[in-house]
Amino acid sequence: MKRFLLCATAAAALAACNNNGAGSKTSGTDSTLNHAFSNYEAHFIDALWKENPDWATNVGFHQYDSVLIVPDSAARQSSLAFAQQHLDSLKSYDLKALSDANKIDYQLIQNYLESVQWNIKEQKGSEWDPSSYNVSNTFAFILNENYAPLETRLRAFGGRLQNIPAYYEAAKKQIKDPVPELTSLAIDQNNGGLSVFEKDFADSLKKTSIPAAEQTAMINSAKTATKAIRDYADWLKALKPEHPRSFRLGKALYDQKFKYDIQSSFSAGQIYDSAVARKAFVHGEMTKISRQLWSKYFGTAPMPTDSLELVGLMIDTLSVKHVKPEEFQSAIEKQLPSLIAFIKEKDLLYIDPSKPLVVRKEPAYMAGVAGASISAPGPYDKGGNTYYNVGSLEGWPKDKAESYLREYNHYILQILDIHEAIPGHYTQLVYANRSPSLIKSLMSNGAMIEGWAVYTEQMMLENGYGNDEPEMWLMWYKWNLRTVCNTILDYSVHVKDMSKEDAIHLLTKEAFQQAAEAEGKWKRVSVTSVQLTSYFTGYKEIIDLRAAYKQQQGQNYNLKKFNETFLSYGSAPVKYIRQLMLKGE
């Protein structure tokens, strides 16, 4: 991976590229002001990495790899001062006089800074979320990514080790009445990352010519760090808070978090209402398909009069077609070439063959939230691997594994690959790293990213993927219902106090999910908030944008052009991309 933008001057050169991006020219813009804003962006990014060294490392800026910030009150005050300083700086730029591309960057920076303030002053997650304290991820990144010689990376690793004991001591002082579910997650994830320090680091040192005395000192530091991590997990296990906080966020905090995290043109309540309406529509479509397929699978047997029972029976029948537990990861790998071939055949969008996608077993330090995910290189590490992380079924009881595999059956596994890999997350993130705007790549919008992945599922089927089989459409509607019910579940649990019993009923009876999947989703909604709404929100906004774009273009409408133009703006909120793509509407 190339390391570049090593100074503010180099950063300015890239930031200035914003003025050459799609939709960047606007009549009435001030070229002097835009040039000044590009220089400001470079200064902001340079200061951002000094304030957030972990983030810097993970996006490929390695100047601060050896720095681990201790999360104490001084660090919080530093973050607040940083946010206020740059909010004040933004006021010196007239938003209306900036180019279209720079307007988006301005709003992304502003949203980020305001969210920093809100997180510290109002949400106060550092007090009740023990899982927010976990050093394993960045250390593992330094070990595993070949962005610099191994000895260089190991010395940075060794430098970061020094602050681990102080890091976890500070964490203990911050935590007040933590959420029990987040406490359990913190224990699991911190213990899951111990092998990075106990084994992986030592194994890597053996491959170098670092002097023996220096290696010994580094190993001793790793042992001290390991003890601090283990002590933190043990401290959490022994913690008995008198008034543990509920994991439910509550309406006031939820609405604000939705505003900052999702950056939608809709409110959280409006998205919830849209999801409820979408659920009713999808149920209707699934009922039609199930009636169409009934005789094929059930012959002359009487058809249930209850539509949800009918759909549930059809889904259960189709779900028995799945891979064996030990073949789960290999089956995912085998499907990827056929997706690429289909996209090329239908000319849906360009797929860059030079960007590697590596399917791997989900690392232990990432476990506990989702069964499949993408880890992509940042905009500074454009040559790096993109990892498709797949949860392992190793050691699972037979009945639990069977339930999980019925959920990710023959049809759903293909849709999962579309969503997570091609042309979903993997493809979108490759495009995002090509965006001329560094800010749009760095401050990526989760709803746009997840929404694109959901949108591509529908797009692929609309263009004939799966041979237009009603079985594939039925299973996609089931999968789409998951997206819809993610929003309903998240809002209902965190705002409307939905019980676990009602949540499981929603997921198993109305979304037709397997028990194992429903239990996993309940765990996820108890350790996250708002993120589950990103899928449906982004999907809805992209589908709405495509319809408006198609109407505007008329006979000139081209799906490939829409897809590639949309992706060219980086991972910006859809509401801002819409402004650029429908400009003059």
Image (cartoon, helix red, strand yellow):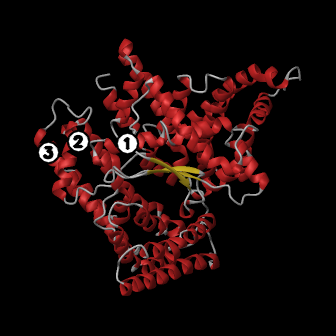
Q: Secondary structure at mark 3?
A: helix
Q: Is residue 94 visible?
A: no
Q: Which mark is residue 146?
A: none
Residue at image location 21% in from the left, 53% down from the top:
11
Whole-Å distance between the Cαs marked 3 and 1?
Answer: 33 Å
Q: Is residue 477 left or right of residue 203?
A: right
Q: Is residue 38 above or below residue 453?
A: below
Residue 466: give x, y in percent of width and height.
61, 27
Q: Nearer the viewer, residue 241 or 505?
A: 505
* Residue placed under numbered mark 3 in the picture: 35
Please report whichever mark, 2 or 3, sits nearer to the chain's N-terminal start. 2
Q: Is residue 162 visible?
A: yes
Residue 193: give x, y in percent of width and height.
53, 69
Label 3, residues with CA under 10 Å away: few <14, some 14-19, many ≥20: some
* Residue placed under numbered mark 2 in the picture: 18
Q: Secondary structure at mark 1?
A: loop
